Image (tube, rainbow, N blue to C red):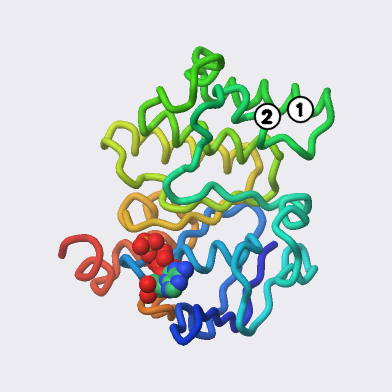
């Protein structure tokens, strides 16, 4: 579904991503794990069209997308939940969700909204509240709900567990598994390698902008190298 080939990304003189290749197949949860600064966010933003590749190719359903505008990429069925959520304060929960549905027409929008409300009942309860009044976990749900409003085929999630209490982290990860079961493919970026690998079909470990290990979620979680570097021994 998504193929990244020999991707390199630079910020001026800094090379953040070095010649990486990986793929995401339909129906999978694939995770990219790695420490702070390993290049995870850069890769996601390049796929979404927010950052330009220096070299390499990105294909989504066999079509090259790396020179396309972000809104064209969303229209193809690829939607990103950004790191730090970025929900719109000063707008209600409902208005935030509407912002995610700019490509949907009336009836489709209503259907998407019903699906989001059934997945996240708390958003329905709070639909008329300012998004700023939600807790961190609820804001993460809202950011995910907003991305799901465009009915993506592939959902890109950047650090959904960041800054959340353990109980919310559990809830968010079980929601990601549910999203997969309902037919959306997921590319998940996490510093919380343990949680990410526990739900991932496959994963890649990044270090300084390079892929240093790959395997199934279980293989990586069991690997001594990963345990030492990311799972506290
Ligand atoms: P984090 O978990 O902190 O988001 P990450 O693995 O997502 O880390 P990136 O944010 O992609 O890593 O950063 C990769 C490298 O690129 C780092 O060295 C970072 O300092 C650098 N970098 C990221 N954004 C920019 C930018 N806008 N301008 C210059 N350098 C940047």
Q: Position of residue 9 (x, y in %)?
A: 54, 79
Q: Quadrant of residue 184?
A: top right
Tag 2: Cα neighbours inside 10 Å, few (<14), some, or many (≥20)?
some
Return the residue nearer the eye: 192 or 79. 79
Q: Position of residue 172 (x, y in %)?
A: 42, 37
Q: Is residue 14 left or right of residue 165?
A: right
Up the image or down, 193 lies above or below 7; here it is above
Q: Are marks 1 and 2 in contact (CB under 8 Å)?
A: yes
Q: Which circle's residue, 1 or 2, is located before the other in the chain?
A: 2
Q: Quadrant of residue 146?
A: top right
Residue at the spot 43% in from the left edge and 78% down from the top edge: 209
Q: Is residue 206 visible?
A: no
Identity of the residue furthest to the left in this view: 233
Which numbered dot is residue 109? Answer: 1
Total tally of numbered discs in the picture:
2
Residue at the spot 71% in from the left edge and 28% down from the top edge: 112
Q: Position of residue 25 (x, y in %)?
A: 64, 61
Which numbered dot is residue 4? Answer: none
* 3D distance between C-alphas at marks 1 and 2: 8 Å
Q: Is residue 78 left or right of residue 190?
A: right
Where does the C terminus fall, quadrant-wise?
A: bottom left
The mark lying in front, picked from 1 and 2, is 2
Q: Quadrant of ligand 1?
A: bottom left
Tag 1: Cα neighbours inside 10 Å, few (<14), some, or many (≥20)?
many
Secondary structure of the residue carrying numbered label 2: helix
Up the image or down, 134 lies above or below 11; here it is above
Tag 2 residue: 98
Secondary structure of the residue carrying numbered label 1: helix
Q: Position of residue 157 (x, y in %)?
A: 51, 50
Where does the N terminus fall, quadrant-wise?
A: bottom right
């Amino acid at each position: 579904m998504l193929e990244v080939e020999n991707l390199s990304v630079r910020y001026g003189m800094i090379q953040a991503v070095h010649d990486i290749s990986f793929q995401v197949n339909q129906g999978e949860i694939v995770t990219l794990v790695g420490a702070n600064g390993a290049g995870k966010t850069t890769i996601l933003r390049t796929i979404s069209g927010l950052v330009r590749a220096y070299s390499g190719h990105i294909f989504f359903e066999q079509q090259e997308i790396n020179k396309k505008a972000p809104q064209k990429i969303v229209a193809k069925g690829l939607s990103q939940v950004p790191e730090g959520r970025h929900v719109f304060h000063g707008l209600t929960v409902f208005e935030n969700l509407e912002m995610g549905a700019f490509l949907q027409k009336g009836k489709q929008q209503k259907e998407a909204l019903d699906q989001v409300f059934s997945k996240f009942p708390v958003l329905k309860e709070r639909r008329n509240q300012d998004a700023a009044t939600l807790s961190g976990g609820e804001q993460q749900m809202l950011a995910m709900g907003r991305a799901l409003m465009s009915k993506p085929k592939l959902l890109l999630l950047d650090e959904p567990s960041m800054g959340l209490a353990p109980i919310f982290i559990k809830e968010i990860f079980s929601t990601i598994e549910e999203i997969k079961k309902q037919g959306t493919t997921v590319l998940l970026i996490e510093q919380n390698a343990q949680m990410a690998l526990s739900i991932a079909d496959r994963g890649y470990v990044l270090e300084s902008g390079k892929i240093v290990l790959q395997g199934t979620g279980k293989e990586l979680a069991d690997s001594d190298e990963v345990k030492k570097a990311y799972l506290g021994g």
